[in-house]
Image (tube, rainbow, N blue to C red):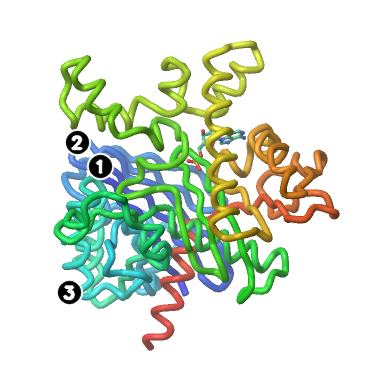
């Protein structure tokens, strides 16, 4: 089944056309600067990248340009749009009402609308993408794959914040977790790749990229995850602080005479690796190069990043009362041997030893612990677009 996978941001739209059976990507690209001047980057597999500058006032024009590019007689990969059998949308927040991917109908649209409060930057953009596809490809099934859905199996003790209960009652303030599509895909792949028992397994997934989160998965179900009400909680990320004492907000706001909103923006956009390195970079590659050249700011940022991962893994081993496998994924998890080594060397108390040679792995499923390790550690590349494609195809087939 040919599935168009769509991931809308407030002014951007990423897409891939994937065949769910062969897993082949026919074309991919992105629209940028939607609402401003507009730019489409389109790349058919095996072909040249094409850049088209054209006005796209809304997501509807952006999707229209993508569809035109896909059926373009010269560089397109489809004869007609009839060959697109379904559209899979990445949607950020499904709140507490949605625990799985679903075929989009009026009810699902109202839940996404209700959750705009919880995902103010993403949910409205996701809705625009959904409405545009419905308008331009009437009658095609659209599926929503939620970033929060996989984490809905967390027990109350893991998702509640210890604040007055009325805030949960009134506003649904709780931990939701994000990157769920990746955590689901990687935990499943880890169980399959390592031959674990799906009904009797404890896995920790460390999704480490520009945004990072970690999850504890028992028998294929998420029992805890590091991101919270928003993606700000948890690990040290590219520009997000992750965990901190909430009193820091008031303290800095008073000292600097800034608003809470401004402080939350700083915690989201100017903190993490970027903040710790005194503005050097939010990108791990830049920092690891600078650290090799003796830069103390880069070293501080990387030390803090690794230390937080080590602490979270330890706490999830405790939460699950054991662990069978730990999987690294995301741009840093899949590529940064240094981070994996620093983390795994600190897990010797679990009887884990790193296979230094295997740890050079990049871009493939690979065990990086030694055969005598009590817990298996692996690199498992994530593929969120493929996961969205597969979940979309499965739902649409089951509906037929
Ligand atoms: P993501 O958000 O998953 O795309 O990951 C982005 C992060 O992965 C950035 O911090 C990159 O510096 C890091 N990254 C990507 N490729 C590499 C690489 N080859 N080695 C080290 N870090 C990398």
Q: Which residue is mark 1?
A: 11
Question: How many numbered circles does the render carry?
Answer: 3
Q: Are marks 1 and 3 in contact (CB under 8 Å)?
A: no
Q: Which residue is mark 2?
A: 36
In the image, residue 239 lies at what x, y percent?
Answer: 40, 30
Q: Residue at x 29, y 47 (%)?
A: 9
Secondary structure found at label 3: helix
Residue 70 quadrant: bottom left
Q: Residues within 10 Å of mark 2 (few under 14, many from 20)?
A: few
Residue 165 quadrant: bottom left
Please tell me which residue lies in front, 79 or 8.
8
Q: How much space separates mark 2 and mark 3, taking CA atoms?
A: 30 Å
Q: Residue at x 22, y 62 (%)?
A: 112
379 vs 102: above or below: above
Q: How much space separates mark 2 and mark 1, taking CA atoms?
A: 8 Å
In the image, residue 336 lies at what x, y percent?
Answer: 64, 36
Secondary structure found at label 1: loop
Q: Which mark is residue 106?
A: 3
Earlier-in-chain disc, 2 versus 3: 2
Q: Which dot, 2 or 3, sits closer to the camera?
A: 3
Question: In the rendered image, is residue 71 in sight?
Answer: no
The residue furthest bottom is 400
In the image, residue 327 lies at what x, y percent?
Answer: 63, 53
Please tell me which residue lies in front, 70 or 14.
14
């Amino acid at each position: 089944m040919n599935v168009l996978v769509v991931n809308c941001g407030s002014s951007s739209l990423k897409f891939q056309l994937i065949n769910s059976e062969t897993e082949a990507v026919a074309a991919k690209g992105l629209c940028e600067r939607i609402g401003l001047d507009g730019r489409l980057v389109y790349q058919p597999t095996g072909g040249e990248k094409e850049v088209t500058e054209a006005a796209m006032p809304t997501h509807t024009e952006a999707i229209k340009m993508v569809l035109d590019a896909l059926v373009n007689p010269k560089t397109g990969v489809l004869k007609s749009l009839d060959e697109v059998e379904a559209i899979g949308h990445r949607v950020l927040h499904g709140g507490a009402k949605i625990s799985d991917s679903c075929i989009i109908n009026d009810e699902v649209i109202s839940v996404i609308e209700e959750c705009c409060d919880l995902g103010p930057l993403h949910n409205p953009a996701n809705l625009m993408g959904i409405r545009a596809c419905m308008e331009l490809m009437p009658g095609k099934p659209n599926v929503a794959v939620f970033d929060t859905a996989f984490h809905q199996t967390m027990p109350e003790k893991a998702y509640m914040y210890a604040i007055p209960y009325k805030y949960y009652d009134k506003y649904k303030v709780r931990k939701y977790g994000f990157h769920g599509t990746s955590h689901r895909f990687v935990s499943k792949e880890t169980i399959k790749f390592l031959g674990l028992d799906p009904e009797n397994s404890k896995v920790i997934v460390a999704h480490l990229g520009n945004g990072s989160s970690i999850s504890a998965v028992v028998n294929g179900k998420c029992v805890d995850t590091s991101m919270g009400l928003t993606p700000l909680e948890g690990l040290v990320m590219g520009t997000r602080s992750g965990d901190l004492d909430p009193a820091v907000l008031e303290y800095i706001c008073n000292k600097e005479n800034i608003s809470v909103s401004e402080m939350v923006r700083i915690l989201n956009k100017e903190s993490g690796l970027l903040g710790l390195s005194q503005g050097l970079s939010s990108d791990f590659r830049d920092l690891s190069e600078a650290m090799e050249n003796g830069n103390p700011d880069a070293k501080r940022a990387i030390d803090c990043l690794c230390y937080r991962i080590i602490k979270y893994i330890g706490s999830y081993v405790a939460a699950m009362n054991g662990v069978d496998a730990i999987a690294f994924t995301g741009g840093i998890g899949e590529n940064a041997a240094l981070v994996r080594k620093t983390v795994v060397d600190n897990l010797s108390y679990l009887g884990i030893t790193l296979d230094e040679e295997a740890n050079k792995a990049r871009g493939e499923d690979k065990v990086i612990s030694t055969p005598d390790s009590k817990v298996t550690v692996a690199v498992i590349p994530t593929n969120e677009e493929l996961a969205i494609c597969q979940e979309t195809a499965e739902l649409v087939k089951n509906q037929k």
